[in-house]
Image (cartoon, rainbow, N blue to C red):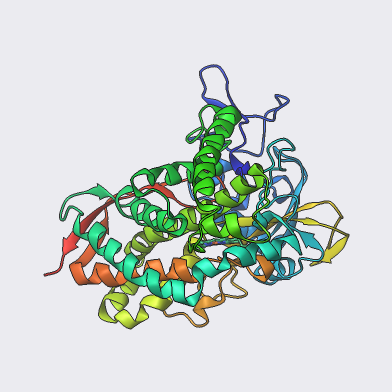
C-alpha cells in the first residue's frame, strides 16, 4: 500500500533546498519544489500535469487542477511520473464506470500507483480479483455484521465518552492525537482483540504501511519500511498461534483469518498483507474523517449552527463530511484489455487512477460540490467508500463511530474552535491531517 506521491525523488541540491528529481537524476519540471510558490491551475499545461505531486496534496492545492481536468481532459494521460505513465479518471460517472467494471479493470497488480515488489508483495484481498477476493472478503465480513455492530455501539460510546471527558477545556490541544487517533486505534484493537496497552503499535504500523516513500514517516526509506512491517508480522504471528487452535470460534479478525476455510493456509506475507489492509482500512480513513468533522464545521459555520440546532441531521452530516474529506483520494486499477472511456483508449496493461477526491467534487453530480451542505440531497451517493466488489467493508462501522462522536460531543460542548490551519499528510493516497489545534467550549 505504499503511497506513490511521495516517491523519494527529492534530492538535496546546493543551498537552494530540495529539487524534485526522477531516479535517473533528471529534474522533475512538473513537480513543485517544497515550499516554492504553486503556479495557479489556470497557468499550467495540462499535458504536463502529474497530479500526484506531493506538494499539491500537502498544501491542499490540487482542487483547481482537478477542476480543469474534469472540464478539459476528464480521462487524462500522464506520460511520465516517478513510477511510469498512468491515467487519471476525474469525473463521477467515469469513476463509477471503472469501479464497477472489475472484469476489465483489475485490482490484482495493486491499488496504488506503485507496483508490488516481487519479493515483498503483501497480497491482500483489496488487491485481488474474483474469485479469491470474494472468499477472503467473506471470511472477515461478519466482523461488521449487524449483531457485531450492535455490540460495538455500546463499547464505542463508552470509549468516546471517556476520551471526550478527558480533554482539556478552554485551552488548546491537538485533536488528531488526542481524539481521532485515540478513538480509531481503540476500535482497531477491539476488532483484532489486540493487547490494549500496545494499541499505538497499530497506529504506527498503519502510518508505516502507507508511508514507505514518505520521509516524514520512514526516514530510513524502504529498509525501515520492511523492518517495521516484519515486526508487525512477528507480533501478529504470535496472536495467530494463540488463536488458531482455539476451541471457540472467535469473533475477532485474527481468529476469523486463522480459522477461516479460505484463509487458514495463507502464507505469512499474505497474512501480513491482509492485516495491513484491515489496519489501514479501519484506521486512517475514520481517523481523518473525525478530524475533518471538526475542521469542516469550522469552515462552514452556518452548517455547524444547523447541526447544533437539529441533531437528527447527524447521520446526514456524517455522510457529507466523508464526501467532502474523501480520506482515500484514489484507488488504482489496471486495464486487462483495451477500453474506450470518454473518447480515450486505455490500453491493456495501463494503470488507471480513479480519483474519488475529484469525483466527489464533480459539479455534474453534486450541486455546490466544494461546500459542506449537511442535508444535501442524495448525501450517501458519494464515492468515498468506492463502488463495486471492493466497496468498503467497514463503511457502516466508520459512520457509526463518527455519529457517536457527534452525539457525545453535543452532550458536553457548545463549540469547538480550530485555532490554526491543520497540518496535512504528504501524499495523494491517504488524504488527511497530522495535527489540528483546537479549543473546546463547554456547554453553557
Ligand atoms: C470513513 C471511513 C472509511 C472510508 C472512507 C473507507 C474507504 C474505503 C475505500 C475507498 C475502499 C476501496 C473501495 C474500492 O476499491 O472500490 C475501502 C475498502 C475497504 N475498507 Fe474501508 N473505509 C472506511 C472505513 C473502514 C473501516 C472502519 C474498516 C474496518 C473494518 C474498513 C475496511 C475496509 C476493507 C477491508 C476494504 C477492502 C474491501 C474489498 O476489497 O473488498 N474500512 N474502504
Q: Residue at x 53, y 81 (%)?
A: 378
On the image, the x and y values in percent for residue 206 come to 49, 46
Q: Picture coordinates of residue 369 (x, y %)?
A: 52, 70
**Residue at point 56% right, 75% down?**
366
Residue 248 drawn at (x, y percent): 49, 63
Q: Quadrant of ligand 1?
A: bottom right
Is the C terminus in the top left, top right, bottom left or bottom right quadrant?
bottom left
Residue furthest front in the image = 247
Q: Is residue 109 above or below residue 100?
A: above
Left or right: 176 in relation to 19: left
Q: Is residue 405 visible?
A: no
**Residue placed most toward the observer, 336 or 193:** 193
The residue lying toward the viewer, choosing from 166 and 276, is 276
Q: Is residue 101 above or below residue 221?
A: below
Q: Nearer the viewer, residue 134 or 15?
A: 134
Count of all numbered marks drawn on residues in the image: 0
Q: Is residue 282 left or right of residue 418?
A: right
Residue 414 in the image, given as x and y percentages of width and height: 19, 68
The answer to whether any part of residue 126 appears in the image is yes
Q: Residue furthest top?
A: 14
Q: In the orientation shown, which residue stands out farthest toward the left?
A: 444
Q: Is residue 282 left or right of residue 404?
A: right
Q: Residue at x 44, y 46 (%)?
A: 202
Amino acid at each position: 500500500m505504499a503511497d506513490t506521491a511521495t516517491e523519494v525523488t527529492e534530492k538535496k541540491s546546493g543551498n537552494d533546498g530540495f529539487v524534485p528529481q526522477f531516479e535517473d537524476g533528471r529534474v522533475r519540471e512538473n513537480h513543485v519544489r517544497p515550499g516554492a510558490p504553486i503556479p495557479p491551475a489556470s497557468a499550467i499545461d495540462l499535458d504536463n500535469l502529474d497530479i500526484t505531486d506531493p506538494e499539491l496534496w500537502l498544501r491542499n492545492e490540487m482542487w483547481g487542477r482537478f477542476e480543469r481536468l474534469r472540464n478539459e481532459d476528464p480521462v487524462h494521460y500522464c506520460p511520465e511520473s516517478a513510477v511510469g505513465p498512468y491515467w487519471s479518471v476525474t469525473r463521477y460517472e467515469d469513476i463509477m464506470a471503472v469501479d464497477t467494471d472489475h472484469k476489465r479493470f483489475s485490482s490484482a497488480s495493486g491499488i496504488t500507483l506503485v507496483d508490488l515488489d516481487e519479493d515483498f508483495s503483501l497480497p491482500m484481498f483489496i488487491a485481488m480479483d474474483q474469485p479469491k477476493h470474494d472468499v477472503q472478503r467473506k471470511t472477515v465480513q461478519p466482523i461488521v455484521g449487524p449483531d457485531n455492530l450492535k455490540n460495538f455501539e455500546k463499547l464505542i460510546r463508552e470509549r468516546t465518552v471517556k476520551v471526550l471527558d478527558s480533554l482539556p477545556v478552554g485551552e488548546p490541544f491537538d485533536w488528531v492525537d488526542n481524539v481521532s487517533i485515540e478513538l480509531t486505534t481503540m476500535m482497531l484493537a477491539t476488532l483484532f482483540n489486540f493487547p490494549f496497552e500496545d494499541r499505538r503499535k497499530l497506529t504506527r504500523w498503519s502510518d508505516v504501511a502507507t508511508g514507505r516513500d514518505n520521509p516524514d514517516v520512514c526516514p530510513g526509506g524502504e529498509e525501515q519500511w520492511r523492518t517495521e512491517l516484519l515486526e508487525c508480522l512477528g507480533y501478529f504471528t504470535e496472536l495467530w498461534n494463540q488463536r488458531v487452535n482455539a476451541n471457540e470460534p472467535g469473533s475477532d479478525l485474527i481468529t476469523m483469518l486463522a480459522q477461516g476455510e479460505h484463509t487458514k493456509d495463507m502464507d505469512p506475507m499474505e497474512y501480513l498483507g491482509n492485516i495491513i489492509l484491515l489496519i489501514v482500512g479501519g484506521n486512517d480513513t475514520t481517523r481523518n474523517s473525525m478530524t475533518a468533522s471538526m475542521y469542516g464545521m469550522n469552515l462552514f459555520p452556518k452548517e455547524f449552527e444547523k447541526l447544533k440546532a437539529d441533531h437528527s441531521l447527524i447521520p446526514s452530516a456524517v455522510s457529507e463530511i466523508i464526501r467532502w474529506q474523501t480520506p482515500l483520494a484514489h484507488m488504482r486499477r489496471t486495464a486487462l484489455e483495451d477500453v474506450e472511456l470518454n473518447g480515450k483508449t486505455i490500453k491493456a496493461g495501463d494503470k488507471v487512477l480513479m480519483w474519488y477526491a475529484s469525483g466527489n467534487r464533480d459539479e455534474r453530480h453534486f450541486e455546490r460540490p466544494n461546500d459542506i451542505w449537511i442535508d444535501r440531497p442524495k448525501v450517501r451517493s458519494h464515492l468515498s467508500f468506492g463502488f463495486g466488489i471492493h466497496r468498503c467493508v467497514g463503511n457502516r462501522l466508520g459512520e457509526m463511530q463518527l455519529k457517536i462522536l457527534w452525539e457525545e460531543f453535543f452532550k458536553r460542548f457548545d463549540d469547538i474552535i480550530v485555532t490554526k490551519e491543520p497540518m496535512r499528510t504528504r501524499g495523494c493516497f491517504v488524504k488527511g491531517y497530522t495535527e489540528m489545534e483546537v479549543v473546546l467550549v463547554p456547554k453553557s
